[in-house]
């Protein structure tokens, strides 16, 4: 089972932008019902693509800098990074197939 790590404004660059492998980051908050709905999907992605894609989460209430920098205006928003650049974005609760499609473009 892959570990689903939390990232912060402080370690975002090292964990996401400088990651050796493509990274998916889930921007979420405790009070967000749609965020809780996609949480199991995000965990499944971490397990299924362990070693091929890094999957992390960022609480926007505790880390406002990074979401602001990337124009995150609604949550959940999931960004896919490859080589330190955003290559795809999903906003809102979507079916697992949408997230699988995102990951397939990264691997």
Image (tube, rainbow, N blue to C red):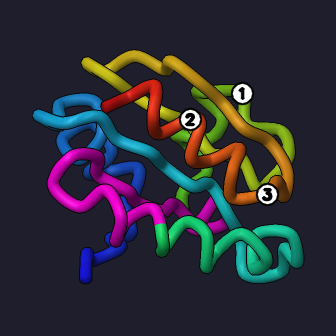
Q: CA distance from mark 1 to mark 3?
A: 23 Å
Quadrant for the N terminus in the image:
bottom left
Dot 2 alpha-carbon crowd within 10 angstroms: few under 14, some 14 to 19, many 20 or more:
some
Where residue 41 appears, as percent x and y from the top left, is 61, 69
- Labelled pair 2, 1 in contact (Cβ < 8 Å): no
Q: Which residues are magenta?
A: 45-62
Indicate which disc, 2 or 1, sits on the residue closer to the N terminus: 1
Where residue 107 appears, as percent x and y from the top left, is 31, 31
Tell me the tag on residue 95.
Answer: 3
Tell me the tag on residue 19.
Answer: none
Q: CA distance from mark 2 to mark 1?
A: 19 Å
Please give the name of the residue rendered at 35% of the width and 73% of the height, measured from the top-left corner. 4
Q: Quadrant of residue 30?
A: bottom right
Which residue position holds label 1? 71
* Secondary element at image label 1: loop
Please give the name of the residue rendered at 18% of the width and 41% of the height, measured from the top-left corner. 14
Tell me the tag on residue 102.
Answer: 2
Q: Nearer the viewer, mark 2 or mark 1?
A: 2
Left or right, residue 43 beside residue 61: left
Q: Identify which residue, 38 or 12, lies in the foreground.
A: 38
Q: Quadrant of residue 16?
A: top left
Indicate which disc, 1 or 3, sits on the residue closer to the N terminus: 1
Dot 1 alpha-carbon crowd within 10 angstroms: few under 14, some 14 to 19, many 20 or more:
few
Left or right, residue 34 beside residue 107: right
* Secondary element at image label 2: helix
Q: Is residue 15 above or below residue 5?
A: above
Whether the magenta-drawn stretch holds residue 59 is answered as yes
Where residue 65 appears, as percent x and y from the top left, is 55, 42
Dot 3 alpha-carbon crowd within 10 angstroms: few under 14, some 14 to 19, many 20 or more:
few
Q: Quadrant of residue 45?
A: bottom left
């Amino acid at each position: 089972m892959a570990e689903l790590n939390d990232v912060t404004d402080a370690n975002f660059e090292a964990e996401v932008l400088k990651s050796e492998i493509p990274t998916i980051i889930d921007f979420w908050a405790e009070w967000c019902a749609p965020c809780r709905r996609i949480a199991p999907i995000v965990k499944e992605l971490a397990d299924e693509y362990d070693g091929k894609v890094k999957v992390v989460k960022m609480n926007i209430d505790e880390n406002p800098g990074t979401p602001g920098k990337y124009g995150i205006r609604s949550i959940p928003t999931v960004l896919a990074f490859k080589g330190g650049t955003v290559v795809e974005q999903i906003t809102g609760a979507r079916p697992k197939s949408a997230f699988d499609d995102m990951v397939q473009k990264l691997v």
